[in-house]
Amino acid sequence: MSQELKLCDFDISKTTGFVATAPPLVKLPGEYFSQWEDVCAAIPHLVKQRQLRANIEALPDRKFSEETLQSEEEWRRAYVLLTFLSQSYIWAEGEARVVDTLPKKLAVPWCTVSEHVTLKPVATYASVVLYNYRLCDPNGGLTADNLVAISNFTGTEDESWFYMVHMLVELAAVPGLNAIERVFQAMKSGQNSVLVDQLQIIEKSIYSMRETLKGMYKKCKPSVFYVNVRPFLAGTQGISLFPNGLVYEGVDCEPRRYCGGSAAQTTSIPSFDTLLGIKHLESEDSPSFMEKMREYQPKQHRNFLVAIENQQPSLRDYITESQNPELIKQYNRILDALIEFRKGHMKLISVFVIMQSEKHGFKASEANGKDSIPVQPPNSEDGSDTNGIGTPDMKAEAKDEDTTPIGKPVKALAFKGTGGTALETFLDKIKNSTEAMKIPLPG
């Protein structure tokens, strides 16, 4: 058996999981970065007024280094600050005037800070979710009514809620993450009854994550997200507007390509995938999009996935060799839970991206070079489907599109995720590779 796996060795909290126990800094302290923070806070207004780029270009030069950033909390806030300023600079004037060069004033510090926090200089899940929340009541808990985003591209409740629902999904994963630690302890001691109990906790945790994700509709309108929020989260990989990538002026001459912020960059669901031995490969020798997304996770978190992979024996091998019917059944139930989570995610994507793309007259054949993707609308009479995901009022939503910064949908992002993937094909492959891991019962 390999070295004992402990969450605390990977910057994972037993109470908040991959979310830091203490809330992130709301702004960098002191006067040195105050003008930068002021522009960041004004992003929604400046984008609407078409003044964002001019205000950023007028910022005083500032050094983001160990001399000016004194703690990891400050480095993380600097990463969030530079991410919001840089992504808004790129997309501030919509698809027609997107830039392919990021000015030195932003590019150099963003790359420096990104290297320090072991993340990419692009919008990431960490920058908009994990490092971007505050408590409305500092004495309150991490609950839906007490969480709000620190930084925001659009100034809308929709955007903040989009990020915070993902925060709540992370918190729902915590019991399952704690169980992973105990799974390997039970395997080491041969306590199969304890192992079954821990696997049941993981199953319940995944179903809780799925239920939490359904809350997205409460305060995030699909049209506001699609038209005004998601362009700011986009990267340059797989997006036709950036055929050569993005030049980071003052860093290097060659353009770079990065995937944008994506829920695939969470470490929670991949932790359960890795525990079960699920591999989402494009081919036998080619890493999948999901595996590439590890590069966009904080280093300690991706090290956790490697540590799970290195445990010997693996959970799957242990259960297969045991031929214990209860263990096999419970292992397969977790796979079912993951499949249901992914079905729920697919339905959410259908309403927030696929249906919105079609609503705006885009065609999948133009976006992805293939026939139009069929969209399955919610199937019950009251506008909701069996997973509790309903169809929003499209007419009511249309009024909101003109009140937010960009105001026009980005054709280059139609039918694609902000990570650059063709969404339904990608998600369907993930679901199928999970289903294929079922272990047959003996006899």
Image (cartoon, rainbow, N blue to C red):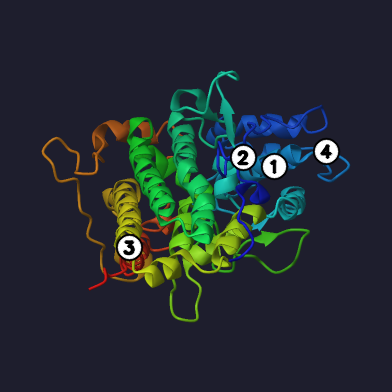
Q: Position of residue 267 (x, y in %)?
A: 53, 53
Viewer-nearest residue: 363 or 21:
21
Visible residue check, residue 406:
no
Give how far apart the Cα atoms at labels 3 and 2 are: 38 Å
Give how far apart the Cα atoms at labels 2 and 4 are: 17 Å
The residue singled out by tag 2 in the image is 131
Give how far apart the Cα atoms at labels 1 and 3 are: 42 Å
CB atoms of marks 2 and 4 within 8 Å: no
Left or right of residue 62, residue 348 in this image? left
Q: From what the image shows, is residue 55 above or below residue 330?
A: above
Q: Residues within 10 Å of mark 4 (few under 14, many from 20)?
A: few
Q: Which mark is residue 328?
A: 3
Visible residue check, residue 8:
yes
Q: Can you say which quadrant of the picture contains the N terminus?
A: bottom right
Q: Earlier in the sequence, mark 1 or mark 3?
A: 1
Residue 437 placement: quadrant: bottom left
What is the three-letter code of the residue carrying label 2? Answer: Tyr
Farthest-out residue, bottom: 285
Helix, strand or loop at label 4? It is loop
The residue singled out by tag 4 in the image is 70
Left or right of residue 440, residue 152 in this image? right
The residue singled out by tag 1 in the image is 76
Q: Earlier in the sequence, mark 3 or mark 2?
A: 2
**Which residue is found at the position 76% from the left and 29% from the top?**
34
Give how far apart the Cα atoms at labels 2 and 1 are: 7 Å
CB atoms of marks 2 and 1 within 8 Å: yes
CB atoms of marks 4 and 1 within 8 Å: no
CB atoms of marks 3 and 2 within 8 Å: no
Give how far apart the Cα atoms at labels 3 and 4 are: 50 Å
